[in-house]
Amino acid sequence: MKLKLYFLESRPQFLILSLVLGFLGTAIAWFYGYFDLGYALLATFGLIMAHSSVNTVNDYCDYKSGIDLVARRTPFSGGSGMLPAALLKSAEVFWMTIITFLIAVGVGVYFVLVTGWELFPLLFIGALCIFLYTPVILKQKWPEWAPGLGLGSLPILGAYFIQTSAYTWPVVIASIPSGILVSNLLFLNEFPDTEADKTVNRKTTPILVGKQKASKIYAVLTLLVYIWIAVWVIAGVMPVFSLLAFLTLPIAVKAMKGAKRYQDMNQLMPAMAANVIVVLLIQFLLGVGYILAGVF
C-alpha cells in the first residue's frame, strides 16, 4: 500500500515529460550519428529520478508553508494532495526527495566519469533548479525560467552530451523549444494558484503582471516555439521533418483561447489540458522528426 502512495506522490503523470525529454535528446544525437541504448535508458532513468525529486520537494515545501491547505487543487496544479490528506507523513516525503535526488546524483556522477567533466556544470545548474525552485526562485520575479531550464533545455543538452561527449550549437538551438514549452507548462498551471501563492510571497508572472497580461505572454511564448522551429528549419539547422511539430498548432490555439478566458475554470481547465498535450507532443514530434531525417 505504501509503495502505491509513494508512486502517486511522485506524480507519475508528470514524469511523462522526462521520458519525452530523454527521447528527444537521444533522437538528436542519433541524427548526428551517435547512439548507445544503455546510456539512453540510464540517462532517462536519472532524469525521472531528478524530476521525482522536484515534485516531492515541491509538495514538502508547500505543505510546510501551509499553502497546500488553501490552494485549489486541479489535475495540473496544487500538488499531489498526499500530505494534506495525511496519506503520507512529511518526513516520508522529505526522505523520498533525498533518496530520488541521490539516485539522480549517482547517475550524473557516473556519466561525468565516463563521458567528460563538461557535463558537470549542466548537472550542477539542474540540481540548483531542483532545490531552490520552491523555497527561493518562486519568490523572485519571473521564476518560470527555472523549470524551463532545469526540466527543458538542460535535459536535452545532457542527453545529447551523454551520447556524444560534446555540445554543439545545433543542439543548443534544438533545445530552446523545450525550454519555452516547459516554462509555459508551469506558467499556465500557475493561474489557478495566484491567490494561494500570494500568501507565501511568491512572485509568479500571473501575480506580477496580472492574468490578463500573463495570458498574452503565454500566447506569445507558445507562438514563439513554432516561429523558432520554422526559422531554423529554413536556415538548415533543424531538419525539415521538425515541421511535424506544426501538427499540434490547432491544440495550441485551443490552449491560447482558453488562457484568455482564465476567469472561467470551465474554459481554463481544458486549456491547461491542451497545454500539457502541446508540451509533450511537440517534443515527441521533434524527436520523430530527427529520426525520420536520419533515415531519409
Image (cartoon, rainbow, N blue to C red):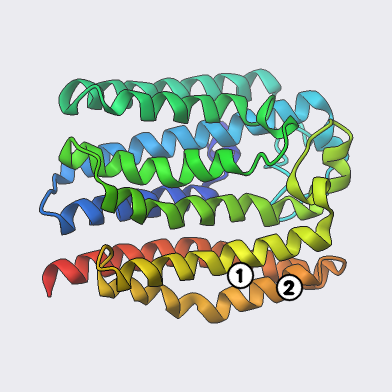
The answer to whether 21 is drawn above or below residue 48 in the figure is below
Around disc 1, counting alpha carbons within 10 Å, would you say few (fewer than 14), some (14 to 19), or many (20 or more)? Answer: many
Q: Secondary structure at mark 1?
A: helix
The label on residue 274 is 1
At a point 40% along the width and 67% down the height, the residue shown is 229
Residue at image mark 2? 258
What residue is drawn where x is 51% and y is 61%? 279
Residue 156 in the figure: left or right of residue 223: left
Amino acid type indicated by mark 2: Gly
- The N terminus - image quarter: top right
Tag 1 or tag 2, which sits nearer the N-term?
2
> Is residue 29 in sight in this rendering?
yes
Amino acid type at image mark 1 = Ala
The quarter of the image holding the C terminus is bottom left
**Quadrant assignment, res 108:** top left
Task: Point out residue 115 in the picture as x, y percentages from the top left corner.
Answer: 17, 28
**Do the residues bearing badges 2 and 1 touch, measured as CB atoms within 8 Å?**
yes
Q: Is residue 11 above or below residue 282?
A: above
- Whole-percent x and y of residue 2? 57, 32
Q: Secondary structure at mark 2?
A: helix
Residue 101 drawn at (x, y percent): 46, 24
- Count how many numbered circles sit on residues in the image: 2
In this picture, residue 83 sits left or right of residue 275:
right
Q: CA distance from mark 2 to mark 1?
A: 9 Å
Q: 33 or 72, which is in the foreground?
A: 33
